Amino acid sequence: LIHLAYPPSKFGFLYAKTMIKASCQKAKRIIVTSYYTQEDLSQKLSIPKDTITVIPTGPGIQFDGLDPSPRKWEADTPVSITQYPYILYVGNIRKSKNIETLCEAVLQAKKKVPEIKLILAGKISMPQLVEKYKNSPEIKFLGESSVGRLKELYARAKLFVFPSYYEGFGLPPLEAMACGVPCIVSNATSLPEVCGNAAEYFDPDDKETLAKKLVELWNNSAKREELIQKGFENIKRFSWEKCAKSMANLFKDTLRMNRDEC
């Protein structure tokens, strides 16, 4: 059995060709987290689709039932960011995540919404990007965050944006939905499959449309509430309990298959 959380893409195809293909061709079963990944893997590596099983994951239980009311922040959270409503991004700061488009869209939206602010929480793999926006007070890179800080960041966010070019699944939008945050995500790869009708979508190369959606949702409390309620419904499709049960059933089927072949 092989579990692939990060399928081959244009950002990592060399690694996929040299490391993943041989393993996949020998595997009895391959587990992926989305139907998009199943199709992508089958096409790029010539793997029969009937050997690839889709088992989605879900937001961690630490994000379930989070009360979004104001609370005491962790000591390591900069006080300045608690004083304003803000847009949140959670995830690695790397090329495939399309962070520059998000930053530029926020700067464009700021012309119509002067109080707008962006907080980015995640491992920084592109220090040059941090350097580029270091003089933009409305953009704050926090780096990696503890679970406690993430819960607070989600709980206080006015909007969550996920502009990624490529996702095999896309867990942060589900975490945001579990915390009652309206989401705007790119319409790329697996994200529409995972987020369903519970998010606003944009082309990841279209910063103008993203900026427009930021302004519209920032100023429209009724639309934000509609997305919040749709988000609560959407995350019911995903859970680690469902994932574990599906994994266990697949393990049993694979063991049974092995016994039958002996």
Image: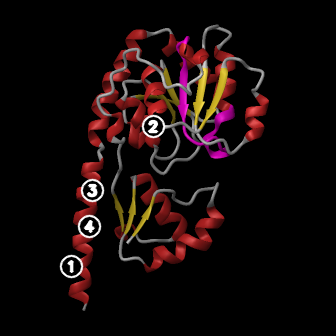
Q: Marks 4/2: CA distance? A: 31 Å
Q: Marks 4/1: CA distance? A: 10 Å
Q: Amino acid at mark 4?
A: Leu
Q: Amino acid at mark 3?
A: Ala
Q: Which residues are magenta?
A: 83-100
In the rendered image, which residue does mark 1 sit on? Answer: 256
Where is residue 6 drawn, in percent x and y?
A: 51, 57
* 10 Å crowding of disc 1: few (<14), some (14-19), many (20+): few
Q: Residue at x 69, y 33 (%)?
A: 100
Name the secondary structure under disc 1: helix
Name the secondary structure under disc 4: helix
Q: Is residue 211 left or right of residue 217?
A: right
Q: Quadrant of the N terminus?
A: bottom left
Q: Is residue 12 magenta?
A: no
Q: Earlier in the sequence, mark 3 or mark 2?
A: 2
Q: Quadrant of residue 89?
A: top right
Name the secondary structure under disc 3: helix
Residue 197 — which label? Answer: none
Residues tagged 4 and 1 counted as in contact (Cβ below 8 A): no
Q: Marks 1/2: CA distance? A: 39 Å
Q: Amino acid at mark 1?
A: Arg
Q: Nearer the viewer, mark 4 or mark 3?
A: 3
In the rendered image, which residue does mark 2 sit on? Answer: 147
Residues tagged 3 and 2 counted as in contact (Cβ below 8 A): no
In the rendered image, which residue does mark 4 sit on? Answer: 250
Q: Residue at x 65, y 44 (%)?
A: 94
Q: Is residue 158 left or right of residue 139?
A: left
Q: Nearer the viewer, mark 1 or mark 2?
A: 2
Foreground residue among 85 and 107: 85
Q: Nearer the viewer, mark 3 or mark 1?
A: 3
Q: Is residue 40 above or below residue 189?
A: below
